[in-house]
């Protein structure tokens, strides 16, 4: 088909014309329009405005939510769906994020802006169905030490509509920063709680501070008790409460930079009530008061000194001296008597003048001719007989008697030389057949030089080997023969052998040529007192040797002073023996041998002491283990010293939006007392209730030197735990006697009489020992010895004082003084040696018997008397204690109540007595009814009062339980140690209350509580 004939796709002409007409009209109109048509921007304006309003609303919501979260925090998540969403590494931060999201979501509801036909809105889109999703929509971070809070909210939805039709929708993240220190308040409170939870050794905190405070108190009051103050309860619960609250203040200052002003005032008031300064100031240095009270400053005013306390400033960390002491006397007496396997001093002096003298001969050939060989007189002669004869002649003469040195401790005392000639002749008989026998002769000669020597030799000795000059000749330190007679003995030995010629002949021809003899030479008259005085002087030096051990080591069984003393003596043995380079004769050597033998006895005694100390240390370990304590940990606790006080600090910087921020803690009750306080004084507790914020317990481990704990220590040494040392029994008897002097009582008198009978029976052994010693060391007859002992015993007022005197050495001194005064000793009792020997013997013998097992007194007799005496202590002190300090008690009782022994003597068998120690197991559990931390001049307060937090998380109008805040609480268990010098009545609680418990420590679950049947605290 041709193109002209094809009409498919053709447009009607009329339609083309209409199109051209319309286009031209439109073009003409456009040319006639004067300007551009207006654009509708209402949607953009609305969007910008709602964005700004949303950011402002989010800032307000974040601020309010952070304040609300601080005011009603959650630190323990509830076991609900919403609560479990908060469970995590930091429950509070998750809770804060949830609150911020819920507040932000609510804040977005009214955020809308209209402009013309356009509407812009902000929201968080579709409903958040779970708390976890809500938490994930928010992140937070602290700024400037947590004093500001930076919040980022994710997926904020901005929508724009016009005439009901959506124009735009987008999701944005918005970050705002608010000046609310919620994180700083929470984190510092957590730091405070960590200090309350820290172990005393592991980290600084409440437990360490309490340990240092109570230990300082125990040591100071223990020293006061030892010094004579009427202190019957060394560590009381009021002291534990005071140290605990002082520790809380230190922890507050370290965590918040400030302490609660009301709490500081409460501690100062409690310090006055407890009477710390009244009791301590006269008897202790400022370090003790500082350790107990913390040198409290005015509330949040000038900083405390940053000076670090000196190590060892507290009495509890001091050392005690452990000396050789009585062991030096014991070793000396054993040396005098030759006891315990030791050589006696007499035998040492005798052996010092003992020597061996010997004679021997030595031969040297100077001519040795050969024997002629047989020579036949001719051929075919046969030798049939030979006869040899010898003629011996000795020539030379004289001998030498001069002493010459042949060795360090050997001398040649005699010498003679002889020439011995042997002349030999041989006759030989020969025979031959058919011939007469013939004889031939031959001769030869041997010549010998023989030396006969007499030698003196000193035997082995305890003294170090040194040259001795002079030796075997008169002279030396004390003059005298000096074993000079050894020369004469050597000559006698030669003479007994037949003389030098005979010895020389025998040396060549055979026979006895040697002899020896042990001699004991004459000793100078001054030798005995000279050696005695020298060893006695050494005894004094050794007695004064001492080492220092930590008192805490001694108290916890970690020190063995005797072992260290033994090591010290061994190290210094050469110095103490003090041997010269050359002995000035045998007297000097004998003197040094006595010194060496004495030191050997000292070392044996110290080694034995070390063994007994190890046994006692094992007993201490058992006693502590029975109380659930590890001795090593107790020792570490005792060595704690105060930490440097924390300086006053602020948080944040001046360049921050808030500037420097001051945090102020506020606890209710401000002072956690072991006694109830009215609920009106405690926020968070109903006004009609009473709240006890602190439960306290302290247990005195060694309240008396016997009983369960002390029995565990002494059982290894004495076996029978039902008996008490004579020293303790004597102290108890003295206490009863003094009490009865002004407070007659039939029960106490009867019990005193029983105890007195037991003590008198034990003192019978002491009396017998004193009599035996006088018999052994003097020539006094029986009546004289009895009178001396009676006079000595009578100088002490009663059997109790005599028993104490027997164990502390004063009775021995008295008996010695009376014995010396008698001047009836046949051995010249007035001589210095005799006087010293009597004193030493009595000191040692009486101490041994007075500390032995056989004189120990039945515990029941002691306990009855002590119990009755203690009743008077309590009765006389109770009224005075209500109105006075312990100095007032002293005036009230007028010193008429006898003291009661207490504590654990740190020394096996009290010989020697190093120190007396005691331990207190201290426990405290406390909680604030309400603990708040605020900002100085601010509106934000962080509160921990145990209240629950509820929020409507899913928007259904019902609040879900999220959790609660954990109260600020603590639990401390530690040990305090007191160590006092030896003697007197020791240290410890003597009021009968060895397990002191406060009101709130009265059931199986002790702790802070309200005074209600269940202990629960109704809220305000």
Image (cartoon, rainbow, N blue to C red):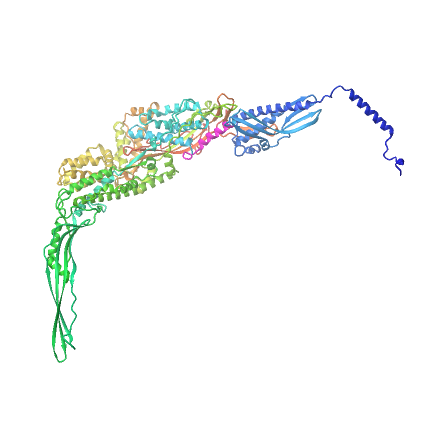
Left or right of 570? Residue 946 is right
The region drawn magenta spans 183-202
Pinpoint residue 11: horizontal percent, then vertical percent. Answer: 86, 31
What is the residue that sits farthest to the front in this orientation? 378
Q: Residue furthest bottom?
A: 434
Q: Is residue 511 visible?
A: no
Q: Extreme right residue here? A: 5
Q: Residue 113, relative to residue 584: is it above or below?
A: above
- With 790 as the anchor, is 188 left or right in this view? right
Front one among 131 and 494: 494
Q: Quadrant of residue 178?
A: top right
**Quarter that holds the N terminus:** top right
Q: Quadrant of residue 41?
A: top right
Q: What main secondary structure does the magenta stretch of the protein show?
A: helix
Q: Quadrant of residue 479?
A: top left
Q: Is residue 504 left or right of residue 941?
A: left
Number of residue marks: 0
> Does residue 730 appear in this view?
yes
Q: Nearer the viewer, residue 764 or 824?
A: 824
Q: Position of residue 682 (x, y in %)?
A: 46, 24
Where's residue 43, x and y in %?
A: 68, 24
Residue 191 falls within the magenta-colored stretch = yes
Residue 321 covered by magenta stretch: no
């Amino acid at each position: 088909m041709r193109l002209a004939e094809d009409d498919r796709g053709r447009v009607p002409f009329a339609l083309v014309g209409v199109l051209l007409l319309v286009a031209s009209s439109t073009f003409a109109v456009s040319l006639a329009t004067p300007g551009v048509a207006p654009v509708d921007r209402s949607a953009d304006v609305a969007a910008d405005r709602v964005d700004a309003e949303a950011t402002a609303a989010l800032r307000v919501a974040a601020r309010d939510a952070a304040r609300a979260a601080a005011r009603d925090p959650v630190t323990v998540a509830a076991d609900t769906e919403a609560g479990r969403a908060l469970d995590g590494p930091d429950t509070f931060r998750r809770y804060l994020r949830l609150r911020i999201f819920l507040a932000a979501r609510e804040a977005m509801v009214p955020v809308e802006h209209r402009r013309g036909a356009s509407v812009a809105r902000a929201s968080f889109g579709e409903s958040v169905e779970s708390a976890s999703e809500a938490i994930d929509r928010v992140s937070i971070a602290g700024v400037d030490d947590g004093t500001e809070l930076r919040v980022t909210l994710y997926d904020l939805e901005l929508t724009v509509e016009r005439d009901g039709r959506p124009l735009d929708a987008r999701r944005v993240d918005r970050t705002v920063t608010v000046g609310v220190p919620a994180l700083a308040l929470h984190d510092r409170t957590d730091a405070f709680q960590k200090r309350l939870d820290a172990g005393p050794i592991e980290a600084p905190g409440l437990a360490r501070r309490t340990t240092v405070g109570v230990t300082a108190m125990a040591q100071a009051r223990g020293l006061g008790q030892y010094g004579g103050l009427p202190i019957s309860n060394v560590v009381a619960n009021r002291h534990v409460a005071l140290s605990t609250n002082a520790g809380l203040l230190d922890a507050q200052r370290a965590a918040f930079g400030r302490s609660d002003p009301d709490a500081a005032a409460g501690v100062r008031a409690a310090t006055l009530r407890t009477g710390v300064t009244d009791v301590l100031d006269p008897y202790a240095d400022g370090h003790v008061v500082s350790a107990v009270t913390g040198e409290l400053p005015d509330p949040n005013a000038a900083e405390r000194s940053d000076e670090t306390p000196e190590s060892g400033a507290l009495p509890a960390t001091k050392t005690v001296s452990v000396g050789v002491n009585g062991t030096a006397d014991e070793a000396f007496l054993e040396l005098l008597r030759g006891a315990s396997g030791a050589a006696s001093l007499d035998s040492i002096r005798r052996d010092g003048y003992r020597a061996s003298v010997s004679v021997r001969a030595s031969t040297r050939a100077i001519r040795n001719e050969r024997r002629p060989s047989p020579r036949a007189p001719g051929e075919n002669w046969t030798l049939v007989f030979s006869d040899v004869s010898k003629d011996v002649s000795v020539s030379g003469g004289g001998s030498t008697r001069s002493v010459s040195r042949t060795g360090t401790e050997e001398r040649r005392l005699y010498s003679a030389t002889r020439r011995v000639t042997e002349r030999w002749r041989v006759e030989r008989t020969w025979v031959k057949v058919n011939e007469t026998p013939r004889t031939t002769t031959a001769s030869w000669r041997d010549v010998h030089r023989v030396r006969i020597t007499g030698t003196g030799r000193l035997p082995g000795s305890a003294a170090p080997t040194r040259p001795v000059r002079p030796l075997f000749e008169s002279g030396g330190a004390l003059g005298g023969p000096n074993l000079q007679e050894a020369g004469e003995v050597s000559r006698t030995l030669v003479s007994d052998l037949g003389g030098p010629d005979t010895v020389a002949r025998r040396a060549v021809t055979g026979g006895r040529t040697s002899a020896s003899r042990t001699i004991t030479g004459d000793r100078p008259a001054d030798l005995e007192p000279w050696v005695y005085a020298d060893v006695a002087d050494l005894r004094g030096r050794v007695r004064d040797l001492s080492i220092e051990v930590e008192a805490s080591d001694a108290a916890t069984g970690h020190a063995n002073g005797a072992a260290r003393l033994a090591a010290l003596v061994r190290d210094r043995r050469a110095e103490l023996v003090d041997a010269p380079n050359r002995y000035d004769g045998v007297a000097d050597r004998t003197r040094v041998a006595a010194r060496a033998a004495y030191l050997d006895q000292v070392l044996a005694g110290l080694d034995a002491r070390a063994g007994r100390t190890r046994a006692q240390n094992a007993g201490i370990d058992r006693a502590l283990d029975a109380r659930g304590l590890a001795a090593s940990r107790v020792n570490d606790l005792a060595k704690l010293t105060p930490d440097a006080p924390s300086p006053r600090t602020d948080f944040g910087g001046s360049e921050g939006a808030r500037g420097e921020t001051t945090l102020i803690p506020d606890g209710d009750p401000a002072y956690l007392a072991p006694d109830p306080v009215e609920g009106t004084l405690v926020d968070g507790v109903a006004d009609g209730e009473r709240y006890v914020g602190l439960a306290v317990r302290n247990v005195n481990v060694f309240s008396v030197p016997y009983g369960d704990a002390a029995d565990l220590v002494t059982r290894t040494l004495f076996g029978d735990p039902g008996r008490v040392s004579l020293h303790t029994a004597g102290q108890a008897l003295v206490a009863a006697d003094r009490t009865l002097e002004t407070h007659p009582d039939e029960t106490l008198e009867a019990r005193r009489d029983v105890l007195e009978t037991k003590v008198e029976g034990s003192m019978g052994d002491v009396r017998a020992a004193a009599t035996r010693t006088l018999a052994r060391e003097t020539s006094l007859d029986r009546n004289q010895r009895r009178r001396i002992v009676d006079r000595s015993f009578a100088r002490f007022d009663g059997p109790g004082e005599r028993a104490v005197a027997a164990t502390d050495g004063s009775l021995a001194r008295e008996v010695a003084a009376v014995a010396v005064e008698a001047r009836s000793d046949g051995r010249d009792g007035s001589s210095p040696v005799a006087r010293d020997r009597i004193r030493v013997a009595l000191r040692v013998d009486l101490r041994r018997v007075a500390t032995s097992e056989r004189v120990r007194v039945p515990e029941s007799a002691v306990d009855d008397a002590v119990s009755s005496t203690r009743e008077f202590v309590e009765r006389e002190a109770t009224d005075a204690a209500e109105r006075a300090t312990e100095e007032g008690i002293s005036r009230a009782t007028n010193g008429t109540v006898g003291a009661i022994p207490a504590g654990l003597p740190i020394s096996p068998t009290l010989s020697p007595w190093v120190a007396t120690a005691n331990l207190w197991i201290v426990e405290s559990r406390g909680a604030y009814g309400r603990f708040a931390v605020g900002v100085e001049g601010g509106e934000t307060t962080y509160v921990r009062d145990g209240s629950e937090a509820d929020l409507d998380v899913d928007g259904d109008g019902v609040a879900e339980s999220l959790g609660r805040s954990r109260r600020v609480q603590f639990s401390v268990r530690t040990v305090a140690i007191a160590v006092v010098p030896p003697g007197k009545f020791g240290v410890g609680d003597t009021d009968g209350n060895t397990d002191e418990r406060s009101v709130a420590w009265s059931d199986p679950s002790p702790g802070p509580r309200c005074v209600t049947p269940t202990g629960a605290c109704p809220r305000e």
